[in-house]
Image (tube, helix red, strand yellow):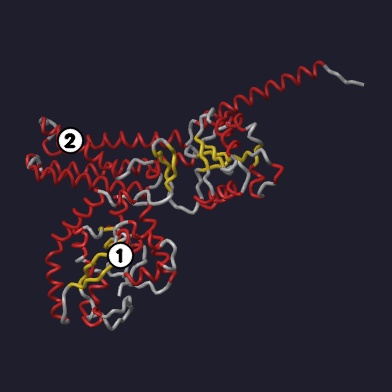
Amino acid sequence: MNNFDPAATVGEHDKHLSQAAAGELGSLLKKGSAQSSARYWLPFFINLLKVSDIVVLLFAGFGGFFVRFGLDAKLSTAGHLFIYLSTLVIIVSLHCAQAYREREILSLNSLLSTLGLGFFGGLSLITIVGYLSGTLSGYSRVWVATSACAWFVLLLANRLILTRMIYRARMANMLDESIIIVGANERAELIVNAIKRSGHANIRVLGVFDDRVERGIPSTLRQHMLGSTCTMLDYIRANPVDRVVVALPWLATERVEALLTKLRTVPVRIDLVPNNVVWQFPSINMERLAGVPVLTIANSRVGEQMGRLKRAEDLVISSILLALVSPVLAIIALAIKLDSPGPVIFKQRRHGFNNQEFEVWKFRSMKVDDCASGEVKQATRFDSRVTRVGGFLRRSSLDELPQLFNVLFGHMSIVGPRPHAIKHNLEFGAIISEYYARHNVKPGITGWAQVNGFRGETDTLDKMQRRVEHDLHYIEHWSLMLDMKILVMTAFSVWFHKTAY
């Protein structure tokens, strides 16, 4: 017997309606929360920092004037011009130091380092141009000094406040980036595991979609399965999804193209995971060559490191350092002459950019007979070949100072991979596959490997391998800010380092 109950049916109908309404409300709430994701809040924080920086710079400029001359003082046109131009120079300098990039504002250390580089770079430019042009002498030194101190303090306060706001936003999950992955395969498994290992609390994997579930799913992905790609668009429209990562193999061209066509109809970022062969390269950039998309997998920064900006950096820094240390150079030269017979400068052929040979200069730190011998052997602790003065020079890195002339001549840079003896290049180049990639840029007086502890004797293959890895990291991630960081670290971690003999 059919137990049909109209009342029950109406009740069930109302229940379904209420559930649908609740589901729709939930969907709206989720869509609202999507508006609070990282892609909306990070630009907000960046713009907030920019605007507040401009405000505090102007405030400090006017405040410094009134502190010096009193509230009744009238600011001249030249005074207004100084405040506005100084604000513009410092803001541009902060931009050049990458102080307003998304990646930088998420870390207090990055915020402080970019502030230091951008602010003092801008202040130095204002001081140098003002001094050379004579315009700075027309302003009160107390006013300028007061404003400069206020600039830095208020810019610092801005970043401390922003860090606190970002921390609260993270605690409220406002900076979470929600992603879904298409393709339940080994690539998707690698992505999920990589996110777990990296500890990125602001990346949430909502789930995985795949049509071919019958082929078998990796065990770590089973709990993340949400269904087939047929239901994917509905899921994206009903949930706060920021990014779709397509992990399908590129060989399935028609399948991938059809999927990408569908995904372009929803407002989310779409990422395509490259073929496995590309994964081994640390730095990948997408460009267009005559309109044709290409992937740059290596050496994307080499052009910049061999360009005019890097050369200008080398010329300015080497010229300033030579002017400052010229008395030291004379004293060291005299000490070497008095300590042992022979020339002051030791010259040796090394490989530079593109394996081209050049003559590197150093203060002689060994006895003449040992320097002139054909055998190339790295110095070791208590090496009998090293002179008394030479031991001090090597430990303090003062023997490297003549390489400032190599920088002026264009054979070297201030920062870059250290040049090795040609014999060592041939030896290690035959063992380490990417060894000669160090020569894709000019060698440097100091480098990323040196400030990270890989300096001096490389008595094992592992030490040289680690040095090469650091050198390649520097080449792929070069920036003026990184050079400045290495120079500051050099002053603390290279001089008097225990591995220099």
Gap between marks 1 and 2, in whole Å?
49 Å
Q: Position of residue 334 (x, y in %)?
A: 12, 75
- Residue drawn 35% across and 71% down? 424
- Residue drawn 26% across and 44% down? 153
Please tell me in which quadrant of the rendered image residue 240 appears: top right
- Residue drawn 15% across and 45% down? 127
- Work out which quarter of the rendered image holds the N terminus and state it: top right
Is 74 situated above or below 187? above
- Residue placed under numbered mark 1 in the picture: 351
Q: Nearer the viewer, mark 1 or mark 2?
A: 1
State the SS at label 2. helix
- Residue placed under numbered mark 2 in the picture: 83
Give the class, few, some or many, for how many residues have Cα within 10 Å of label 1's Cα (few <14, many ≥20): many
Give the class, few, some or many, for how many residues have Cα within 10 Å of label 2's Cα (few <14, many ≥20): some
Q: Position of residue 91 (x, y in %)?
A: 26, 39
For this orientation, the residue located farthest to the right is 1
